[in-house]
Amino acid sequence: MYKVLYRKYRPRFFKDVVGQPQVTVTLQNELMRGRVAHAYLFTGSRGTGKTTCAKILSRAVNCLDPQEGDPCGVCEVCKGLEEGSILDVVEIDAASNNGVDNIRGLIEEANFTPTTARYRVYIIDEVHMLSASAFNALLKTLEEPPAHVIFILATTEVHKLLPTILSRCQRFDFHRIDPQAMASRVQQVAQLEGAQCEEDAALLIARIADGALRDALSLLDQCLGRGRQVTVEMVNQTAGVAAQGYLTALAQAVADGDAAAALETLDQLHRESKDMARLCEEMAEYFRSLMLFKTMKDPSALLTLPPTQLDALEQQAYTMSLPAILHGMDALEEALHKMRYANQRTQLEMAFVRLCTPELDASPAALVRRLERLESGLPPRPLPAAGGHDRPEAPPGPLGAESPRPEPEVFERAPASPPPPKAAQEKAKAPAPQPKPPQPPVDIEALSASAQRFRQWPEILQVIRGSTKSVAMAFDESAAFVNGDYLLIQAPEFAFELLKKPEQRQRMREAVFQVTGRAYKLGPYRLPSAKGQEADPLDDLLTRAGEAGIPAQME
């Protein structure tokens, strides 16, 4: 008969248990020193090794030749316990044997000495399912059991146990297994089965399993039933989860305020038979990842994702504000709760419409988004018009106001205007001012060579998109680099043509200040050009600007 993977590769020794050194090392040390307690309590989430460690402990205390706290696995007692021919180790499912009569029978049986082994061991799984009267019947025996009896209690909900039970046991907490360790174990098992599992696929299995190695091996078992080469696409199809591209598209629809695009993506996923409740959970987890990137310097240790997906998440996080991300998490959690009592697809669609148009949502998180938009000087998002995509262009808001202090820019040469006649006469009578020493020209090539990539640039473009889509579209494929007080922009020539207009330059300056809180000096990004290449038209513009005494940056 076929044996499933999590049973076939269940660890037989403490050294083989994955991700629980705080439990296995302590138990091994106690066994080597002969400090065997009469009652143990193993607690933790599902699939983390509680029952496995209980079985290993039951063999270790009875082994005729223990090896550094581990059972030898070759003596008669070890083989008999593994084969089930020795009945001195009893496993009880408290979910189906939770009555007081079951516990009374166990207590009467515990008075008899073991037939073959040294100890009679009782493993009570899901002990929190025992009734109150069963707990009370067990108390006295658990406190002072016979010398030949050991109790091992296992539970996933330790808060349901009575304090009197907790005080009588040695407690060991099992942690969720580290995703990297779990992915390595998944790949190892796949190789033992004569199959191959991609690294990204193993990480995805670990993320779906959520710290439970048993769930990870069960999912791997299903994937191996489809083929011997486990890929990310196979894991997505087997687990019924949405691909990363769909999650990114839905989040981007929220960032762009495009409810129609979000509804189209949801419809496509629904036609592919994706479970809407599961999709809602995945989107909530996706927004959590965005929140971590928005608030932490390096959240990669908290996310079980391959490097390519981490980079994509980081770039998208810069295009969204933190209030929008938190609003997404709140709305999705509320939708997940309502899905239990209503149509799942409709609830998820309503949640995304509200996320794309916070003016339709009266929740506190939506109000925070609207206030944040008003405080930043952006116009409110217009409500969706009939036809969905035909949204009117947002009128220019305060970002379109020209700066009261005219400043020379590297992207244009300001024409000189003659002074009024009266001012000219007064100026002729006044003593001639001393000429200011010429400012040394800024070496743009030297700044560009040592500049570092400016990761907040997508967020700046998102702010500009709220006031003028033409400039944002011109800089869509652009990048920015920072060097001290200089922000250098790498973009096509036609994008710089737009910045010759004073109102567009002002929008750019205010968007940079809104996102960064700093007033950077702006300029073009240009690496040293190779000899023999055709001169860049922008170089000639910069040269002429330098001859006219215009500094080579935007202040």
Image: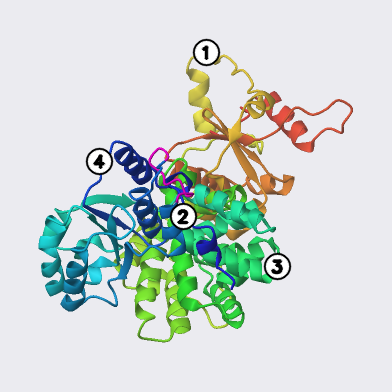
Give the residues in magenta.
Answer: 67-75
Secondary structure beneath dot 4 equals loop
- Badge 4 or badge 2: first in the primary sequence: 4
Secondary structure beneath dot 2 equals helix
Circles 3 and 1: CB atoms closer than 8 Å: no
User: Residue 289 — which label?
Assistant: 2
- Can you give x and y, in whole percent of width and height, for residue 307 in the image? 59, 47
Image color mode: rainbow
User: Residue 434 — which label?
Assistant: 1
Q: How far apart are marks 4 and 3 (CA)?
A: 48 Å
Which dot, 1 or 4, sits closer to the camera?
Answer: 4
- Badge 1 or badge 4: first in the primary sequence: 4
**Point 47% across, 70% down: residue:** 356
- Can you give x and y, in whole percent of width and height, for residue 64 in the image? 38, 46
User: Residue 227 — which label?
Assistant: 3
Which dot, 4 or 3, sits closer to the camera?
Answer: 4
